Amino acid sequence: MVDAAQHDILIVGGGGAGLRAVIAAAEAYPELDIAMVSKVYPMRSHTVSAEGGAAAVIKDDDSREDHIYDTISGADWLADQDAVELFVDEAPGELVQLEHWGCPWSREPDGSVSVRPFGGMKIQRTWFASDKTGFHMLHTLFQTSLKYTQVTRYDEWFATKLLVEGGRCQGVTAIELRTGQVKPILAKAVIMCTGGGGRVFPFTTNASIKTGDGMAMAYRAGVPLKDMEFVQYHPTGLPGTGILITEAARGEGGVMLNNKGERYLADYDLGEALPLDDPRHPQLRAMELGPRDRLSQAFIKEEARGNVFEGEQGSYIHLDVRHLGEAKIDAKIPFVRELAKNYAGIDPVYEPIPVRPVVHYMMGGISTNIDAETVLPGLYAAGECACVSINGANRLGSNSLTELLVFGKRAGHNAAQWAREHPNLDTDALQAQADEEQQRIASRFINKTDGTERISTLRLELQQAMESGAGIYRDEPSLRATVDTIAELQQRFANVALDDHSLSFNTELTTVLELEALLDVGEAVAHSALQRTESRGSHQRTDHPERDDEHFLSHSLAYRGEDGGPPRIEYEDVTITNWPPGARVYGAASPAARDGETAE
Amino acid sequence: MADTVTLEVTRYSPDVDSEPSFELFDVPFHHDWVVLDALNYLKDEVDGSLTYRWSCRMGVCGSCGMMVNGVPILTCAAFLRDYPRGSTIRVEPLQGFPIERDLVIVLDDFLEKLSAVKPWLIREQEQPLEEGEYRQSPEQLADFKQFTMCINCMLCYAACPVYEHDQSFIGPAALAPGQRYILDSRDQGKEQRYPVMWSDDGIWDCTFVGECSTVCPKNVDPAAAIQQAKVESTGAWFQSLLPFGRS
Amino acid sequence: MPNPYRRPHSNTWWLRRLPYTIFMLREWSASFMALYLILLVALVARVNDGESAYQSYVEFTQKPIVIGLHGVLLAFALLHMVTWFQAVPKATRPPRIRGQRPSGRVMIASVYGLWAVASAVVAAIVLVG
């Protein structure tokens, strides 16, 4: 028998956070044996489709306190303030570092980096590389990572399970797609950077690969998933496909109109609609630059009032950027123009873009502390799959790309430190676990011929249950129905049948494993939503419409149930440092953001 | 009877087949469906063993490139309505690459070549982070911006007859990033890339067919990157002939 | 087991699609340009050899087959010119003029302009001078 591959640290997932962790570890400890496993080639990771930008304080009229306050209030006070402080402090350095690695940030005439306005931010601080910031960041990180020849990459290996022995995480099992072999990859420390799980919903900006694999792996290993009920709907996705139209379109001055041509956000406590030629437009922290949860909620209410357009692929409103003019559109948001022409059949220079809220981001994820550590020694997590939390109940646009860098780096350093201090691996026991996993996959999927359920049927029913019960507005009866449906689907999953029984590049196998992960993710989201009987940020309960700081100024922690039972939901207090909970105000009455001041 | 379209798709199972074959499938026609939607429909409802790569479905991840009616294209951007109604749409793996399975090709060659051109910023001296960003004017950015847009979809290799016949050619999607870093005002390492880029397997293997740029979904124009490199390389060679020119 | 399949390559790849066929014609056009150059050099040599040598060359060029040949050469010359002018923006990075580099269209128009001027000069010399 060939010895299992062994490394010092293993990063699971090759997106922005994973690549940043690799580079951080390789730079700090060049002698370390670093490995990265990814189910797709790293440049396919979903970071690539992020568009708008990455936030960090650089302007003279901006301050760390302003960025902190915007983030905390944007999070509806569910963010851990010590983590937000650290995040804001490290952000500028990280973005400069990326620039030093060649990232083609858009520039001012004097050669300095440009920033643009973004939702929920009082001052412009969103760095951007035209409107393909995620693409440029990912390719810069990937190409920079190629410098470090000591890194072993397992491209198109699908990680299926965390290997835990002696109370420590010591690696993963992964399917080498090319051969179909399930192999252990052992490591003294593991960093999970597998992204979110937006594909548990039917309409999402997310790519097909966003199936919460890492969240599920950690969940099954007993690690809690934090704040899973908080799912962000991006207000401007294309109807049908769900393709993202970046917030930058609004940052540059785009406006949202209902079927009467009105800027309806003015009816939802988001300020007043200034005339388009007013020099103060677009007004920061107001109207179209309010936080995403409020904008998505406003759409649902407009829909109930009959003020939205009805189309073949659902209802929508108009995002109008015509007044920006062709030159500005081509300079600042060219990708928006390309996407609208290709996928909505309109040219935004001449016609408004049809948009509606679509699932975009999970604020929740694998629970970590400020050092990217999970409760399982040796396991770290960073990026969308993790929840520190800096995003709380609602994330501000452009904080996520920066988050990948700050916490990816932190995870890389800390995991490397841990690996140096814990050099031993229980190879025999781990190999036995890996053999078991190989057996499980062979008997449950590859060799099973008597199944009755189709993957796509189960997946669609799961997605529909999530949309109907765990969407933008929730209540107890619909959440209970969703919870019950998921439990039923998990039973039916035991009978799933594959058409593809081969070992060579079996993507039906990876699809069924992704569905298995989605069921776990959906379960955590629905149960956490059911137990949180308040409304906060992106979690809105029509039966509990007020925010309840007395009982719920805390993170939910979903622990997987024993023997297929429901998960156990516990709570952990939010860390408050200098910003006691206050009212969340957008529009002209937006407060100043100095230490300790609240809005009343 | 609902509107349908017939797809003719390459099938190849490495464990069983000695060579690829075609299989015919009927898919429902939808006005807004792309070829990728048709493949997903087939995999979900008809034959789960149909194997292909995809992810973002919006033309930015580069996964879903295939030959459709003999032309390399991103299947997420190939609308069914743009093909002649009544005739079959032929879907094959990208030309020039070995076939792993069905519509999946082996990409290892490209990744090796990408590393070979050193596609990272090379500095003699790193500026400390506290001093902020390297200054770069919008004009300097415009000089190389186009060549940064490559999504590594490999359509250019599939369109290149040189690569089809000679896999030692480094190829457009590796040469364009090399040129991108050479042109980046912040880079100080172009001499380190010349030996690989200016070699016989590099720019000089290119005969300027130009189809790489025609099929590129992101307007990277790798042909331009290569021809401009040829001009630079030739100029440098002439300079080296001068008694006091650099070698 | 991995068993990647390498498709055989064909020698008629250039017939597969029109852009490839035009590429091959473009490449062959260089040979036809070379042939025309030989005819031109022959013409100059004949002129140098005196009046009767020049006249016999003129009779040669008036044969239908030679006129036909010149038709083919002209077609290839035009193809050569159009395809290579089209390629000028690819190989050239022009200097900035007032902050902007001239677009591809401008560059192509410029070379056609230069060609028009050069043709006018040659025509003046040959037809008038």
Image (spheres, helix red, strand yellow):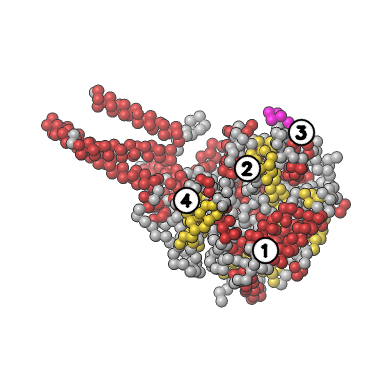
Q: Residues within 10 Å of mark 1 (few under 14, many from 20)?
A: many
Residue B82, relative to residue A381: is it above or below?
above
**Residue position for label 1:** A516
The image quadrant of residue A42 is bottom right
Q: Which residues are magenta?
A: A271-279
Q: Amino acid at mark 2?
A: Phe
Q: Amino acid at mark 4?
A: Ser
Marks 4 and 3: which is nearer the front?
4
Name the residue located 49 percent from the left edge and 58 percent from the top edge. Answer: B24
Residue B51 is one of the magenta-drawn residues: no
- Subunit bearing disc 3: A
Residue A4 relative to residue A479: left or right: left
Calculate the distance from the C-alpha at mark 2 to the C-alpha at mark 4: 45 Å
Question: Are both tags, 2 and 3, on one chain?
Answer: yes
Q: Where residue A183 sits in the image (x, y, percent)?
A: 59, 69
Residue placed under numbered mark 2 in the picture:
A128
Q: Which residue is mark 3?
A: A272
Number of disc labels: 4
| Mark in front: 2 vs 4 | 4
- Cα–Cα gap, marks 4 and 1: 39 Å
Disc 3 residue type? Answer: Glu
Q: Tell me whether the residue at label 2 lies in contact with that at label 4, contact meaning CB atoms closer than 8 angstroms.
A: no
